[in-house]
Image (cartoon, rainbow, N blue to C red):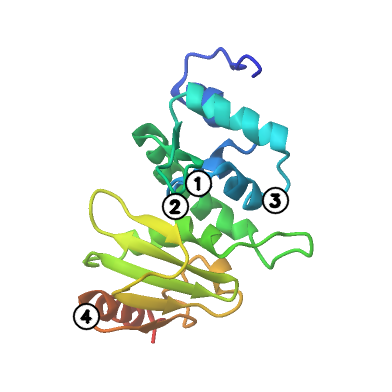
């Protein structure tokens, strides 16, 4: 592992970038926000990263107390990486970056890899901004697959794949994952019964979007 480079500036922004400014670090955080992941799973969902760079970044993130590594109990018996509380605090940073970067997203390029759960961070931020939205589990369905978001508690969280018993299902057609206001652009459809589904439909109705 290479010694950590520093900007050597007495500034909170510079100190933060000393820790998370290396290439791939924040994208590893994005993946681990969904929960513990094996090295092979991380590598599969980070197209373009070499095995050496991924291993190096994970060691650096362990050193900086952003992630921990532990062994799963049998029958799994595999090692997984997971975020520490300090690592999870980067959710707000990624949410702000996603909101800022959405304007440059546009249509997918021919060389772009796509994963459904990459839409989770910006959508969590959008859902958290809906006034009076109750807690519960929202399953999000995209052409590329599905993930689910759990609302309530201190901060929203997400996991890859469908939910076992979602309180609401939010279906977004092709291209909608790139929209900054998917809930209000007339492209989202909500199904389900109960307070959470009703609140999502109500939010869309107020903004002219969800049906």
Q: Is residue 54 visible?
A: yes
Q: Residues within 10 Å of mark 2 (few under 14, many from 20)?
A: many
Q: Nearer the viewer, mark 4 or mark 3?
A: 3
- Mark earlier in primary sequence (3, 2): 2
Q: Earlier in the sequence, mark 1 or mark 4?
A: 1
Residue where numbered disc 1 is placed: 37
- The label nearer to you, 1 versus 2, is 1
Q: Which mark is residue 86?
A: none
**Near-viewer residue (172 or 203):** 172
Q: How far apart are the two marked residues, 1 and 4, measured between alpha carbons?
A: 32 Å
Element under label 2?
Answer: loop
Viewer-proximal residue, 210 or 80?
A: 80
Q: Residue at x 52, y 25 (%)?
A: 19
On the image, which quarter does residue 175 sit in? bottom right
Q: Secondary structure at mark 4?
A: loop
The residue that appears at 59% across and 76% down in the rendered structure is 143
From the viewer's perspective, is residue 124 above or below residue 62?
below
Between residue 126 and residue 121, name the one nearer to us: 121
What residue is disc 4 on?
194
Q: Which residue is at 55% across, 23% downward?
A: 18
Q: Is residue 205 left or right of residue 81?
A: left
Q: Label 2: which residue?
A: 34
- The residue that disc 3 covers is 47
- Residue 166, image quadrant: bottom left
Screen quadrant of the C terminus: bottom left
**Circle 4 residues within 10 Å: few <14, some 14–19, many ≥20:** few
- The spot of residue 137 in percent (x, y) is 31, 67
């Amino acid at each position: 592992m290479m010694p950590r480079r520093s900007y050597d500036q007495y500034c909170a922004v510079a100190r933060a970038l000393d820790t998370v400014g290396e290439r791939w670090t924040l994208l590893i955080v994005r993946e681990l926000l969904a929960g513990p992941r094996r090295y092979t799973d991380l590598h599969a969902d980070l197209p373009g990263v070499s095995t050496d760079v991924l291993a190096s970044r994970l060691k650096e993130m362990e050193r900086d107390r952003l992630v921990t590594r532990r062994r799963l109990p049998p029958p799994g018996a595999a090692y997984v990486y997971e975020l520490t509380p300090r690592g999870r605090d980067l959710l707000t940073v990624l949410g702000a970056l996603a909101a800022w970067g959405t304007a440059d997203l546009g249509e997918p390029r021919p060389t772009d890899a796509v994963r459904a759960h990459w839409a989770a961070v910006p959508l969590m931020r959008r859902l958290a901004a809906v006034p009076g939205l109750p807690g519960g589990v929202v399953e999000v369905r995209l052409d590329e697959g599905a993930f689910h978001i759990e609302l309530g508690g201190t901060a929203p969280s997400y996991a890859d794949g469908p939910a076992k018993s979602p309180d609401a299902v939010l279906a977004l057609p092709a291209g909608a994952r790139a929209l900054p206001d998917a809930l209000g652009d007339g492209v989202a459809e909500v199904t389900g019964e109960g307070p959470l589904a009703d609140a999502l439909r109500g939010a869309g109705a107020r903004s002219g979007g969800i049906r």
